[in-house]
Image (cartoon, rainbow, N blue to C red):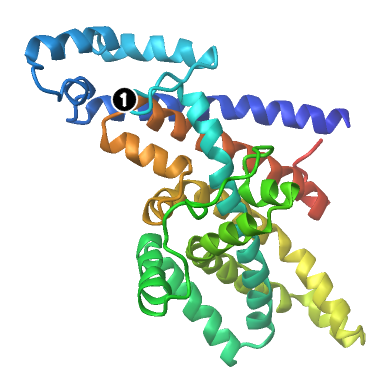
Amino acid sequence: MPAILGFIGRRCLATLPVLAGAVVFTFVVMRLLPADPAAFLASGPGMGQAEIEAIRVSMGLDRSIPEQLAIYAGDVLRGDLGRSYTTGEAVVDDLAARLPASLELTVTAFLLAILVALPLGVLAATRPGSVIDHLCRAIAAAGTSLPTFVVGLLLIHVFYSELGWAPEPVGRMDVMLIPPPVVTGSLVIDALLAGDMEVLASVLGRMVLPCLTMTAFAVAPLARITRGAMIQVLSADFVTAARAAGLPGRMVLTRALRNAAVPVVTTLGMVFSYMLGANVLVEKVFAWPGIGSYALDALMNADYAPVQGFVLLVAIAFTLVNLAIDLLYGLIDPRVGRIG
């Protein structure tokens, strides 16, 4: 246990420069954009250049970028990510209110992708040249070449506009329904806790298309890496020796799966991290009120603080996922030697 705690401590310290780099990069890039937040705020009638300059001073935009960055860094260390002038709320509160919606969508799509991609990759590797193998490669090629928002728009056109099977792609539930009491922020869980099956059905119905969109994005790399890892392991000498020794096929496959697990687990972590960032366009297409659409709306309005908070949150999630992957390495294959 002390070795594991020491490893976690070292990894957490190693992530600090990554988080600091994400904060600095996003802060500087946002300040280099041609849009002026003060001009957005002073877009009403009767607002002139004097009013714009007064707003710039009140927002601290009249200071140099290094001075603004130093002030912002101090605020971040105190847990203050600023205030969104678009919503009028603190960014921390906005992100906390919208994060459950994003996690509900991302986690569901991620689990669906695992259920589809891993068996598909294993079957393709054990049956090279078969229909399943060609299907796996076709899915991998399509998933990596089609942008997520294009897949989402195609699904909306087919299943909502043409067939009428899906509800309108707007929000998390029917606007005529009363949402359940907030316990976790996840409408699925909160509806189950409240026993409101009508709300649950509405939420699940509206989750189908965005979940399928993000699942298609995740299945492609997972299936491809699983197939490649399994093909490499199944051609190894120890598999040939196991088969020659007369071990049952299921036992040989189980051992091969364990040896192929490290690259697959790595890909799982990367895919989940990227899904948190890739949900920006998916949430916008389906009007899903998550952190992705929140950050995109803020970007369109030159609202610096929400975009910076979103990037920092995704960076923290990315480092935590990487830490979990490193811990799993030691459990899957002790030879990796990452812990201790």
Q: Position of residue 15 (x, y in %)?
A: 58, 29
Residue in view at x 69 percent, y 27 percent: 10
Q: Is residue 326 left or right of residue 54?
A: right
**Which of these two is toward me, 270 or 277?**
277
- Element at badge 1? helix
Q: Position of residue 262 (x, y in %)?
A: 70, 58
Q: Is residue 290 above or below residue 176?
A: above
Q: Is residue 339 above or below residue 257?
A: above
Q: Is residue 225 above or below residue 37?
A: below
Residue in view at x 47 percent, y 40 percent: 291
The amino acid type of the residue labelled 1 equals Val
Image mark count = 1
Q: Is residue 169 above or below residue 93?
A: below
Q: Is residue 129 visible?
A: no
Assess disc 1: are there few (<14), some (14-19) or many (≥20) residues with their C-alpha within 10 Å of its C-alpha. Answer: some
**Which of these two is toward me, 335 or 215?**
215
The N terminus is located in which quarter? top right
**Which of these two is toward me, 271 or 334?**
271
Which residue is farthest bottom?
130
Q: Is residue 277 left or right of residue 244?
A: left
Residue in view at x 61 percent, y 55 percent: 199
Q: Position of residue 246 (x, y in %)?
A: 92, 87
Q: Is residue 188 visible?
A: yes
The C terminus is located in which quarter? top right
Residue in view at x 53 percent, y 46 percent: 102
- Residue 297 appears in which quarter of the rendering? top left
Q: Is residue 132 left or right of residue 23?
A: right
In the picture of the structure, the residue carrying the numbered disc 1 is: 28
Q: Is residue 317 left or right of residue 170?
A: right
